[in-house]
Amino acid sequence: MLVDSENPSLNRSSLFSLEGKVALLTGASGFLGRTFAETLLTNGADLIAIGRPAKLGKQVEAWKEKYGSGRVHGYYVDMFDLEALTKTLDEISGRHAVDVLINNAHELAPASGFNTPAGSLDQGNMDVWMRNLTAGVCWPALTVQKIGVGMKERGRGSIINISTMYAVVAPRPALYEGTTFLNPPAYSASKAAMIAFTRYVASFWGSYGIRANAILPGPFSNTEDAGPNSVRVGDPFIEKLKANTSLGRIGRAGELAGALLFLASEASSYVTGQTIVVDGGWTTV
Amino acid sequence: MADKLKVTDAEASNQAQALFDLTGRVAVITGGAGLLGTKHAEILAAAGGIPVLLDLAQAKPEVAAAVIAKKFGVDAAGFATDITQLAEVEKVRNTLLARFGRIDILINNAANNPKVESDGAKAWSRLENFPLEVWNDDLRVGLTGAFLCSRVFGSEMAKRGKGVILNIASDLAVIAPDQRLYRQTGVAEDRQPVKPVTYSVVKTGLIGLTRYLATYWATSGVRVNAISPGGVFNNQPEAFLAELHQRIPLARMAHADEYQGSILFLCSDASSYMTGANLVVDGGRTCW
């Protein structure tokens, strides 16, 4: 590859490089989280992963084996236990100089109203609402507060919040009719709040060299896991999702890697308070 | 050990090297010999692309292209072209197809941009006096030029089933100009310089063109996005900078090379699932 020797930043791999950076990722063992983790590690960042031990533990061991044990740190906590989460974040903040914070975790399960009538507009109870607001608002608020202290001291940091296209457009009822899928209103509301929070952080901490942005993924169906929110390959629901995009297809998890690398690296040094919509043109029409 | 080091296809696709690669891709850049046009060309060349600079004859696009070709060791071309003339744009297309056999990327970057903050500012920029000829000329370059280039080069991409169009809009496609920024002391109210109306209209129009083309060619494999950059530092007067910095969370203007990351992101396969989007790169100016 050709490199501009006078201006090394013009080398495309160094412009988007995460070499020497430390990235904290929540929800690292989820469908998109795994791709984010691999993207961070493959491009040079050390990874701090937060999540529940049952899911994350094995994954962290596999990454240590693959990328080196010194580059991967697992912190195990049930994030709904806010006291325990606070303690964990204090611990991380004391041990690691985090450059990139990625708020990716959410609970896509019946307990938070996914794929059950109990999550619907008519029936969703306050517990469903609180679990979504806790995940979409309180978790980012806590991580930003705790990890942001160090970022402010060091005068740099990139915060990336993973929201959704459903923060800017509503799900269409017809899409879900006749399926077992349901996307609860609490999810849309919590992820829209997350965007407002993103702008607030960008505004108040911009002068400290901290940037805050959000990625809004479109239809990235989890066809890999057998979890409560996964979709079988060939499910007619996927055809309906495809028809709602402009590009006529659902996204592959790896297609979020570019946006993540862009926001995590110096390639986006003048980007803050913004949303990057990666939705195959779903919201364009 | 060798097995462990082997990267799978999925992992390889997450590597910056592969994601942002443009090897052999022919990229037409309008206004290509200007301050930002050459910066766009440089990052595409650094990623292995073949920049094709279109600009007016006096901007010497062929000279700018030769400089980039030498600096990056890639093929590059420059053509003196009036992009408001269909026949001239079609001539460039024919030349490119004969020489490279393909057109992969179009960056609609050309626009008239009178520097109202500099001392050349005159009362002509005010809406009450704004000359019809200037209005027509600004729209012709900024919008008609983008339309003609999209029609000619974009159709070629759609025919081949793959391509990217990137429209360079502005933060002034998202917010209104703050005319207080351009005020000069000791100048009568009706003589105060302002950002011309055409700038907002052209840049906002480009966002409409972006969305229209994105859905129009979506199934033909042509992705169309926009970036909305804020202002670039170019030794503007201190007083202007002080005022502007207060309006930007990052408290500074952009460096001339600071849009290159966005350009490469949206021109490469790193953004393969993005179309119809507007990437705002403004230091946070529009977020508060």
Image (cartoon, grey):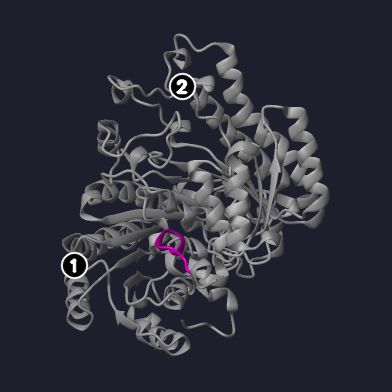
**Subunit of label 1:** B
Q: What numbered label is drawn on residue B96?
A: none
Q: Secondary structure at mark 2?
A: loop
- In the figure, is residue B5 to the left or right of B75? right
Name the kind of residue labelled 1 in the image.
Answer: Leu
Q: Are marks 1 and 2 on the same chain?
A: no
Magenta region = B6-12
- In the figure, is residue B55 to the left or right of B3? left
Q: To which quarter of the image does residue B135 belong?
A: bottom left
In this rendering, the answer to whether A73 lies above or below B164 is above
**How far is mark 1 from mark 2, CA to CA?**
51 Å
In this rendering, the answer to whether B201 lies above or below A52 is below
**Callout 2: 10 Å neighbours few (<14), some, many (20+)?**
many
Name the kind of residue labelled 2 in the image.
Answer: Pro
Spot occupied by residue B34 in the image (x, y as percentages of width and height): 45, 74
In this rendering, the answer to whether B9 lies above or below A28 is below
Is B47 in the magenta?
no
Q: What numbered label is drawn on residue B86?
A: 1
Residue, disc 2: A184
Q: To which quarter of the image does residue B44 belong?
A: bottom left
Name the foreground residue: B98 vs B271. B271
